[in-house]
């Protein structure tokens, strides 16, 4: 299977994993809708310069109204959405992120973006996928959904919810050939790490069995695999983590 003549909607496409995913999907022949609350025009330019097909749209993934407008617009222009990659996400930069130290504002910001956002996205695109005989969705969970990690209470809750919601949605819509999976990345070298110290960055790298950070392109390749090859895969949360989830606590 190829992605030629398909339409993929990618959230968080302005940078990081979202940008890498948009570029990868366009490189495999798909038309990519690069959705972000930030300006994703640089991603579109990269795709255009490589001979691919893309457009940018503004999307606040926390807003059901924004989702409805984006999906309606894509369907009007392209007639279909074959794939949804729910990549957009944040970490708590407002407060401490322990269970006790977390503030309500910080909790709401992370949960609304990282968990509510994927739910709203699936709710917006699945009816059209059912009408056209199927589709595929990939959500981004995290290694934090599978292991206890320090100072990540809101993020762990959101990404654990993504894994559970992915499983539930896969159960509900598999009969309509809508296949839904999640990826649980380890620590990926994206702009979200820009403010951590070199020592913290190295400690994160050393936690992986292969002793380096992941690259956005490595997550993008797994998204492309689920879309292109994953005809018998649904309900999974698949670690792409350099072996971290296989590592003992030593």
Image (cartoon, rainbow, N blue to C red):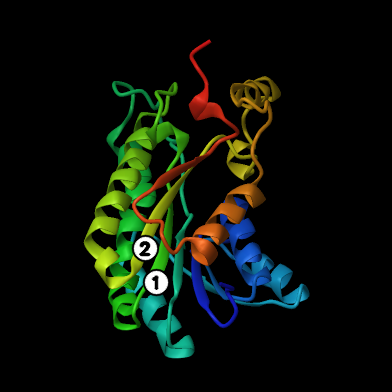
Most foreground residue, 14 or 94:
14
Q: Does residue 198 appear left or right of residue 242 in this picture?
A: right
- Circle 1: element type: strand
Tell me which residue sits at (58%, 41%) in the image: 192
Tell me which residue sits at (40%, 30%) in the image: 95
Tell me which residue sits at (41%, 84%) in the image: 75
Most foreground residue, 100 or 183:
183
Q: Mark 2, residues whose alpha carbon is within 10 Å: few (<14), some, or many (≥20)?
A: many
Marker disc for residue 179: 2
Q: Mark 1, residues whose alpha carbon is within 10 Å: few (<14), some, or many (≥20)?
A: many
- Circle 2: element type: strand
Query: Residue 82: x percent and y percent?
Result: 44, 75
Specify the quadrant of the image occupied by residue 94. Answer: top left
Residues at marks 1 and 2, CA–CA distance in whole angstroms: 6 Å
Query: Residue 34: x percent and y percent?
Result: 55, 69
Q: Earlier in the sequence, mark 1 or mark 2?
A: 1
Tell me if residue 75 comes above or below residue 179 in the rendering.
below
Q: Does residue 14 appear left or right of residue 106 in this picture?
A: right
Q: Does residue 100 appear left or right of residue 24 in this picture?
A: left
Q: Are marks 1 and 2 in contact (CB under 8 Å)?
A: yes
**Which residue appears farthest toward the right when viewing the image?**
49
**Which residue appears farthest toward the top when viewing the image?**
250
Most foreground residue, 118 or 58:
118
Most foreground residue, 191 or 18:
18
Instruction: Using the rendered image of the protein, determine whether residue 36 is visible from the camera's viewpoint.
Output: no
Marker disc for residue 168: none
Specify the quadrant of the image occupied by residue 67. Answer: bottom left
Marker disc for residue 135: 1
Query: Residue 66: x percent and y percent?
Result: 36, 70
**Which residue appears farthest toward the front when viewing the image?**
232
Quadrant showing the N terminus: bottom right
Query: Residue 179: x percent and y percent?
Result: 37, 63
């Amino acid at each position: 299977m190829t992605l030629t003549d398909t339409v993929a909607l990618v959230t968080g496409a302005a940078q990081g994993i979202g940008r890498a995913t948009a570029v990868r999907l366009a490189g495999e022949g798909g038309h990519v809708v690069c959705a972000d609350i930030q300006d994703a025009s640089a991603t579109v330019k990269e795709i255009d310069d490589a001979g691919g097909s893309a457009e940018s749209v503004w999307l606040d993934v926390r807003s059901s109204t924004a989702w409805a407008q984006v999906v309606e617009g894509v369907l009007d222009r392209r007639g279909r959405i074959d794939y949804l990659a729910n990549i957009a996400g944040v970490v708590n930069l407002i407060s401490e992120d322990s269970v006790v130290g977390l503030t309500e504002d910080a909790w709401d910001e992370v949960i609304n973006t990282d968990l509510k956002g994927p739910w709203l996205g699936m709710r917006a695109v699945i009816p059209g996928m059912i009408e056209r005989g199927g589709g595929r969705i990939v959500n981004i969970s995290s290694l934090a959904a599978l292991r206890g990690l320090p100072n990540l209470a809101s993020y762990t809750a959101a990404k654990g919810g993504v894994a559970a919601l992915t499983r539930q949605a896969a159960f509900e819509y598999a009969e309509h050939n809508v296949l839904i999976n999640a990826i649980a990345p380890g620590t990926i070298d994206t702009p979200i790490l820009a403010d951590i110290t070199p020592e913290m960055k190295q400690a994160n790298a050393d936690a992986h069995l292969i002793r380096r950070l992941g690259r956005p392109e490595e997550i993008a390749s797994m998204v492309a695999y689920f879309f292109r090859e994953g005809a018998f895969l649904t309900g999974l949360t698949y670690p792409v983590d350099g072996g971290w989830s296989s590592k003992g606590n030593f």
